[in-house]
Image (spheres, helix red, strand yellow):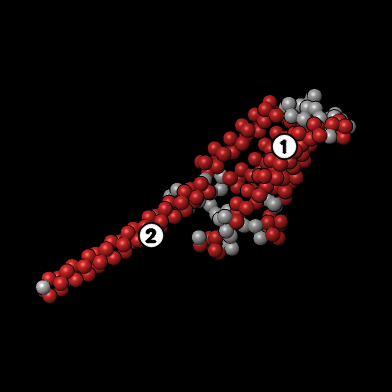
Amino acid sequence: KALFKKYDCSFFGSLIAPLASAPMFMSFFFGLKNAPELFPELLSTGGMLWFPDLTVADPYVIMPVLSATTFLLMTEVGKEQMMASDPVRGQTMVNVFRALAVAMVPMTMSFNSAVFVYWTTNNSFSLVQAVLLKQPALKKAFGIWDPPKPIPGQEPKNIFDEVKNMMNKKEKETNALAAERIKAHNEIVEQQKKVKMSLMEKKLKLK
């Protein structure tokens, strides 16, 4: 919390960009995948070089390889960031992305070329952006600070640990509030019993 406050950051604010871009990415993917059925004449001549027809798969599998290669390069460029706070888990994630990049070629080679035009272009822009933002001059100009290194002897925490801790803290607060309500309710019941006993004793005395 102190770091978030010091650098004017928000945990949930950092999730806005990926959560907002995911629906857009999926919309583009499904839109381009189904576009040949809606615009066959336009896309059949909309390509260039070795992929003139965007409605069919790349016959030379060059586009799937380019898409996978740019994805792999993005992983290699960003691996330092992924491994900064938790080297062990970060390395695992890097290896998963590497395997995914290799598996993408046979898994997606049957997709039409229009999809790969989007994927390759998007990956290329993202790769260039990642490389540029790693340059010290640009980082200084935009106020981008290096992630803090793990404290020796302290177990590093990643985003999943932070979410888990926040959920546990929220659960404890909820349980504590429920316990306070139960305690207050029991005190009211006890007071009501005392009042009833007092009234009954007064009635007995009057008799």
Neighbour tally class for label 1: few under 14, some 14-19, many 20 plus, Cα within 10 Å: few
Amino acid type assigned to the residue bearing label 1 in the image: Phe
Relative to 143, is 155 on the left or the right? left
Tell me the SS state at disc 1. Answer: helix
Q: Image check: 166 left or right of 146?
A: left
User: Residue 122: x percent and y percent?
Assistant: 74, 42
Residue placed furthest toward the bottom:
206
Q: Which residue: 72% across, 37% down?
A: 30
Task: Give the answer, above or below, for where 65 lies relative to 143.
Answer: above
Q: Answer yes or no: do the residues labelled 2 and 1 have beta carbons within 8 Å?
A: no
**Residue 184 in picture, x, y percent from top left:** 31, 64
Hey, which quadrant is residue 123 in on the image?
top right
Of residues 141 and 93, the one nearer the viewer is 93
Where residue 198 appears, x then y in whole percent? 18, 71
Disc 1: which residue: 30
- Residue 207 higher or lower than 65, as above or below: below
Mark 2 or mark 1: name the one nearer the start of the chain.
1
Q: Is mark 2 on a helix, strand or loop?
A: helix
Q: Can residue 157 be seen?
A: no
Q: Mark 2 points at which residue?
A: 177
Gap between marks 2 and 1, in whole Å? 46 Å
- Which quadrant of the structure image shows residue 191? bottom left
Circle 2 packing at 10 Å, graded few (<14), some (14-19), many (20+), is: few
- Camera-side residue of 150 and 6: 6
Q: Which residue is drawn at 29% across and 65% down?
A: 188
What residue appears at the point 25 percent right and 66 percent down from the top-left corner? Answer: 192
Q: Nearer the viewer, residue 204 or 164?
A: 204
Q: Residue furthest top?
A: 59
Q: In which quarter of the image is the C terminus?
A: bottom left
Circle 2: residue type: Leu
Task: Answer yes or no: is residue 52 visible.
Answer: yes
* Mark carried by residue 78: none
